[in-house]
Amino acid sequence: MSACLHDALTVVINFPCLACVNSDLRDEDLAFYGEYLENIHEDMQTRVGDLLGMDIPIWVLIPFEANVAEIDISLQEPLNEMQSDEIMHAKFKDEK
């Protein structure tokens, strides 16, 4: 058995639900599943690659900590109102 497949089997043992399957796995099965997972990974990178590379403004990520003066003038008033809303602040804090 190759070292890579041996490592894969060792990892499977760390998952109790998969430990019973460990003895039934063959090298061909592991190679098939490994290739399948690599294909899924490549597919997801293609589909969401642009999302991973997006530059998300800080006021979107942490709106209650963002400096209102540093954002676009058209967004300053709504952001200022939101930052002043204690109920909204508490909801945001709870969901973090």
Image: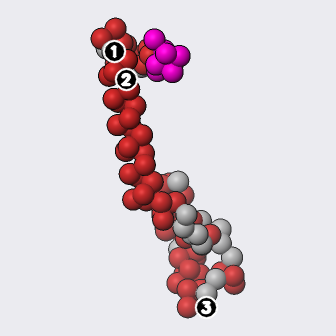
Q: Secondary structure at mark 1?
A: loop
Stretch of the chain drawn in magenta: 1-8
Q: Is residue 63 visible?
A: no
Amino acid at dot 3: Ile
Q: Amino acid at mark 1?
A: Arg
Front tag of 1 and 3 = 1
Identify the residue at horizontal 51%, vertical 21% (top origin).
4
Q: Which mark is residue 30?
A: 2
Residue 6 screen position, x and y as percent: 48, 15
Q: Residues within 10 Å of mark 2 (few under 14, many from 20)?
A: some
Assess whether mark 2 and mark 1 are in contact (beta carbons under 8 angstroms).
yes
Q: What numbered label is drawn on residue 53?
A: none
Q: According to the image, what is the colour scheme of the structure?
A: secondary structure
N-terminal of the two: label 1 or label 3?
1
Q: Quadrant of the N terminus?
A: top left
Residues at marks 3 and 2, CA–CA distance in whole angstroms: 56 Å
Q: Secondary structure at mark 2?
A: helix
Q: Earlier in the sequence, mark 3 or mark 2?
A: 2
Q: Residue at x 54, y 67 (%)?
A: 54
- Residue at (37, 23) in percent of width and height: 30
Instruction: Identify which amino acid the numbered label 2 is placed on.
Output: Leu
Q: CA distance from mark 1 to mark 2?
A: 6 Å
The mark total stands at 3
User: What residue does disc 1 label?
Assistant: 26
Q: Which residue is mark 3?
A: 73
Q: Position of residue 71 (x, y in %)?
A: 64, 83
Q: Nearer the viewer, mark 3 or mark 2?
A: 2
The crowd level at tag 1 (other Cα within 10 Å; few <14, some 14-19, many 20+) is few
CA separation, marks 1 and 3? 62 Å
Q: Mark 3: few, some, or many residues within 10 Å (few <14, many ≥20)?
A: few
Query: Which residue is more in the foreground, 16 or 87?
Result: 16
